[in-house]
Amino acid sequence: MRFKGRCMMSLILALLSAWAALTAMKWPLKTALFPLLISVSVFCGSVVELVLELLEKEEGEQKDTIDFQFSAGVAGPVARHRTVVTFSWIMGFFLLIWFLGFPLAVVLFIFFYLKVQHGEKWGITLAVTIAAWLCFYGLFIRLLHTPMQEGLIFRGLKSLGIG
Amino acid sequence: MFEAFIDGLLAILQLKPFLCMLIGAAVGFCVGILPGIGGGTALALMLPFIYKMTPQEAFPFLLGMHSVVATTGDITSVLFGIPGEAITVATIVDGFPMAKKGEAGRALGAVLMSSLVGALFGAAFLALAIPIVRPLVLAIGSPEMFMLILLGLTCISTLSGRGKRGLLLGFLSGGFGFMCSLVGQDQQVGIQRYTFGQLYLWGGLEIIPVTVGLFAIPEVVDLAVRGTSIAHDLPFGKLGKGVSEGVRDTFRHFWLTLRCSLIGSLIGLLPGLGGGVAQWVSYAHATQSARTEEERANFGKGDVRGVLGPGAANNSKEGASLITVVAFGIPSSIGTAILLGAFFILGLMPGPDMLTKHLTLTYSMVWTIVLANVIAVTVSLLFINHLAKLTTVRGSLINPLVLLLCFIGAYTSTNSMSDLVVLLIFGIIGYFMVLYRWPRPPLIIGFLLGNLAETNLYSSVTRYGVHWVYRPKVLIIFMITLAFAFYPFLQKKLFHREVQPDEI
């Protein structure tokens, strides 16, 4: 019996559905009918899946899905490292948007991603950054007037009467 | 009637209506390509422009835009793995792997041509079905609708996994999708469900951040891990050559394309289901058309049939979804709901008048769908080689731009930072689902249909008690659902019987 990543998925889903069912039990029947029906079914299914996973002896057999699959050409440790780095950049972009707002975050993210992460030449880095920002600004701010939230830093400065 | 049909064509070919249609199609072309700006949003933004137009100009303008959005939305799905529209997600499953194999041209050729076939089918369906569709739509009550939703989910679940446990994983994924749809204010009593006191969650999770996170983030991570271009550094010559091959694929699998168009049209008729469901059900049908386990194994890895089915269905449903609006004033999607608004703005009343007094206008709508799609597909085919070249640009340049599109696409849902949090959460969920081979399509279909399923289940129980389960139409749909669930197993068994050497 081995505990694998897939077991963890089933376990999380089982816990989540159990919590959803327990929460739904406090509601009136009208509100709780569908949530109970779904969460109890999902709980039972995920427990069955978890047990089947734990009892399984061989890995890999008949577990293909008709869906996108990650490329297999890169060695495990390298792939894991690159995955962590990419998720860090994604999280970094989110934090930039949160703290500085979209217009500034777009410039900084694209510039640093190209220059720091991939060491692109100055010409390409600046050209791509400027082109992306112009497209973003022209389309979403000038043309569509999408309301962009101000960054946390600027809001903080404004509340202090600075800027 | 035939006279009105021809008059409808002549009406659209006049200078002003034709120009309005061209402008609308051009806007729809751009809206379709850009993730985040949905067809519904674009229609809503364009609505104020029709106040000074006549109905003969306004409908070509709006429908010209509405009918090409799904066609061009498939382009970004194939090239970058980002859905241009929520209704073009299924195209990613096989379209993007084709692009990664250096077959972007073929995938684009196939998806554009199947989209055209689907659009023409949908227009013909609209033209022919109006007089006969009334009894069908009225026969679908809430119990039947609930069973149809279960049928849709079953289709997706059976397609998603292979082997003995595929169906279970598919249902679990779909169930999780249903659970996600429960977030927000309860429609019956108004109680907040699973909102954690967050105002953002009162209205439920938004479809765009969920879809983009689930489907685009894992692709971005994979591209970064590979460190190559989308097309794996293949020489460009191979990409350009595939376009005519893709167009030929549509006609090579013409019956499949037509069947998926029919699925799209039938789903388009049913209020609430829409293109999001049509694409997946037709994808399910495309995978079930595989005769052997080996053939089926190619789906998800770049099988052209997985591109043809959704391409045809999400366009054919456009024409069909207009039937209920024109004939009964019942919108079947956000887009048609906005179009219904256009009827009232222009002083028209959907219903019998549209089939008698304004029949020419109704047929001009049919022609608008036909002409706008022919123009959009022709223009796309002319530029397809240049579009396919994008898959040869190295990943380091593509990735930040794709991420920008993901973030801005998600943000434009409600213009809230919470949209980005949802994007990140579902990006992580999507990554682990791909890593551990849990199918993502059932999650999306469960999420899309959750509210509708709940409403119909509630109505059925309230109106009929437990007796709704014994209604003949419900039982028939239930039998079809069972047949869909067990079809892959039966098919496998039958195939094995065919090749038993001792039986030859």
Image (cartoon, coloured by chain):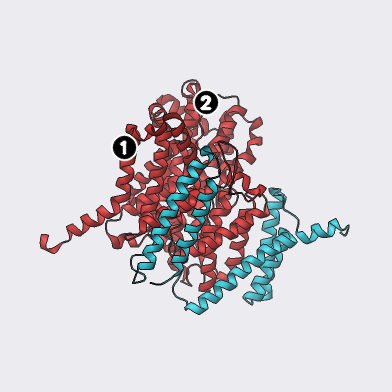
Percent position (x, y) of residue B243? 42, 58
State if disc 2 and disc 1 touch (CB < 8 Å): no
Please tell me whether mark 2 sits on a helix, a strand or a loop: loop
The relative height of residue B154 versus residue B136 in the rendered view (above or below) is below
Q: Residue at x 52, y 58 (%)?
A: B214
Identified by mark 1, the residue type is: Ile
Label 2 neighbour load within 10 Å: few <14, some 14-19, many 20+: some
Q: Residue at x 80, y 59 (%)?
A: A154
Residue at which label 1 appears: B476
Q: Nearer the viewer, mark 1 or mark 2?
A: 1
User: Quadrant where the C terminus of chain B lies?
Assistant: bottom left
B122 lies left or right of A104:
left
Dot placed on the residue nearer the N-terminal end, 1 or 2:
2
The relative height of residue B381 versus residue B140 in the rendered view (above or below) is below
Q: Residue at x 38, y 44 (%)?
A: B151
Q: Chain of mark 1?
A: B
Q: Chain of mark 2?
A: B
B131 lies left or right of B333:
left
Percent position (x, y) of residue B91? 45, 54
Q: Work out how far the residue at label 1 is from the one at label 2, CA to CA, in angstroms.
A: 32 Å
- Residue B353 in sight: yes
| Chain letter for the part of the structure drawn in cyan | A
Q: Residue at x 60, y 62 (%)?
A: B403
Question: Which numbered dot is residue B350?
Answer: 2
| Chain letter for the part of the structure drawn in red | B
